[in-house]
Amino acid sequence: MPNPAIVLVSDKYLDVLEEQFWRYGRDYDIHSASNAQQALETTEQIRAAGGQVALYVADSRLADAHVLKAFHNWRAIVPTARRLVTAHMDHFREDSVALRPGLAKGKFDAFLLMPRGVRDEEFHTAVTEVLSDWGSTVAAPEVETVRIISPVLDGHTMAIRDFMYRMGMPVRTFSPESSEGQEVLAQLDGQEPKYPIVRALGSEPVCAPSVHDVAVAIYGAPSDIDVDQVVDLVIVGGGPAGLAAAVYGASEGLSTVVVEAEAIGGQAGTSSMIRNYLGFPRGISGMRLAQRARSQAIRFGTRFFTGWPVEGVSVGDRVHTLKTGGGELRARAVVIATGVSYRKLRVEAIDSLVGRGVFYGAAMTAAREMEDQDVFVVGGGNSAGQAAVHLSRFARSVTILIRRPSLAATMSDYLIKELEYNPMVTVRSCSEVVDGGGEGRLEWIELKDTTTGELSRHQTGGLFLLLGAEPLCDWVPSEVIKDERGFVLTGRDVPKETWINGVPPGNLATTVPGIFAVGDIRAGSMKRVAAASGEGSSVVPLVHSWIESLNEAEVPSS
C-alpha cells in the first residue's frame, strides 16, 4: 500500500512548496499540482490506486478556483484529509482577512505564511501538528504500543481500545488466528485464553475482561505507595481540573498523587478537537491536551494511578484516608475533581447494545467503523458538536438530535457555524430517541417529535450519546455538603450554618477543612475545559494555606 499522500497546489510558488516539503518524502508521497483541477485529478488517481490523502497544502490564490471552493471539491472525495492554506508574504495580510471567516467555520484547518527560507520551524510545527492529528484519528498506527487480541469487536474490546487511545497509546486489534494474535497467545504459556487479551508496552499479555484490569496491569494500584507515607495532596480525577491541580501542586513542592477511575483526561479527553482553548490556534484534541498535562505533572513528580475509583473517604482532623479497591491513600489535603458523566438514555433496547453500535461519549476509536453509515449524535453541548464534526469525516451522514428548538443556548457559536457549513451534518431539533434494535448490533432507532408526538424509524450504524452531566461523587463523605443535584458546594454556596465564626470557606473549599472541589463536579462551575483548568490551578494556594496551618499547629508555643 502506498504511503499517505500530501498534495501541494500552487501556480506561482509550487517550487517553494516542493522545496519545503522534501523533508516529508520518507513517510509521505508528495504530489504537486499547479491548479485546483489538476489537484482533483491527482486525488482521484491516488484513491484509485488504493491510497489516501493526509493533507492538502494550497496557495491562498489558485489559478482556476477560489481556494475554499477547491477544498470543498477535494473534501467531497477525501473528507478525512486535513486542509492547510499558505499565503505568500505579498498578500498574506489581505488574504488572512478574507479567509478568516472560512477558518472559523472549519472550511480548512490552518492558515500559514509561506516560508521564505530554510528551517522555518514555525511553519513546519504547524504542518506536523496537522499531520499528527490526522495520523491519530484516521490512519491505522504503523507501530502499535498496545495489541488487543479478540475474536470479535464486542463492547469490552472497544472499551479497552478507546481507553488506550485516550491514554495516548497507539493500539491495534487482531484476531486470534492472525500471526500477531498467535504471537501473543504463545506467550500465555499454556494458560487458557480469555478474551480480550492485551499486551501493552512490551509487557506480558493480560487476559483483560475490563478496562480496570488493563489499567492496573499497566499503571499499578494505589497500594504500591508506602502505606506509612502521608502525601500532601491527593487529587481524585484526572480531567483538566485535576491535571491542572497536579501540575501546580507538584511544581510548588507538594507531594502529589492523582487517582483516576478511567482514562486520564476525563470527559474532555474524548473530544476530537477543542478549538477554543487558549494558546492552541489550530485546536488540540482532548487526548493530546490531557497527555501533555500528564507528562508535565509527572515531570514535577506527580504519581498517577489509573483504573481505581475511590470508594470512600474517612475524614480526619489532620489526615484524610481515601479507600480504593487497590489500597488506601492518606493525605493532608484532598481535591475532588471527578467531573461528570454522560446521563444514561434509559431506553432498555438501546442500552442493551452499548458497544455494539451504541456509545456513550465520543468513542473516538469507533469513528473508523462508521464509514458509509448514517450516524446519530444525541446532545447539544460542545462535546456533541465536536463528535459530530469528527464523525462526519467517516460517516455518510451525521444527524444531531436535540430536544431544544436550537443549539444556540448550549453550544459555542464557533462550533455551530462549523456544523452549519458541514454538508455531512444536519441538526434535528425537538427530537428524542425512544427505541432501537438490530440483529446483534444497532441497526435502527425510533425517534419521537417532542412537539407533535410523531414517531419515525431510521436506519443507522451508530448512535453516540452525549446527554449532559451527572456528578461523579457517590464516594464523597456525607460531611461534604452537596446541592440537590449532587454537585459539591464550595465557598459562599455552602449553608451558612456550616460557616466557621461567621466566615465562609475559601471559594473552592468544601464544608470539610482540607477537602476542596474543582471543575465540573463543583456546583456553579462553568462546565468548560479552560474554566476547569483555571480552578485546578487556583486551588493550589488554598491547599498550601491549609497545609501551612497544619504545620503551624504542630509547632509548640514558646
Image (spheres, helix red, strand yellow):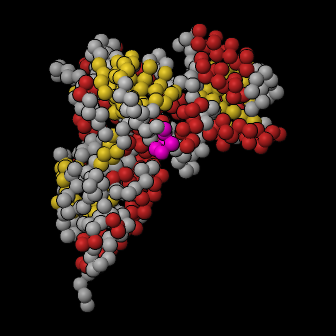
Residue 131 visible in image: no
Q: In the picture shown, does residue 274 fall above or below 453?
A: below
* Horizontal side of residue 247 vs 176, given as left or right: right
Residue span colored magenta:
406-411
Q: How many marks?
A: 0
Please give the name of the residue rendered at 19% of the width and 49% of the height, measured from the top-left corner.
Answer: 311
Q: Position of residue 250 (x, y in %)?
A: 39, 59
Q: In the picture shown, does residue 468 fall above or below 134?
A: below
Q: Nearer the viewer, residue 237 or 215?
A: 237
Q: In the picture shown, does residue 218 fall above or below 309?
A: above
500 falls in the magenta region: no
Residue 51 visible in image: yes
Please give the name of the residue rendered at 61% of the width and 36% of the height, measured from the top-left corner.
Answer: 105
Q: Position of residue 211 (x, y in %)?
A: 27, 34
Please give the name of the residue rendered at 21% of the width and 51% of the height, measured from the top-left corner.
Answer: 475
Q: Nearer the viewer, residue 535 or 410?
A: 410
User: If the image is split into quadrants, where does the C terminus sit?
Assistant: bottom left
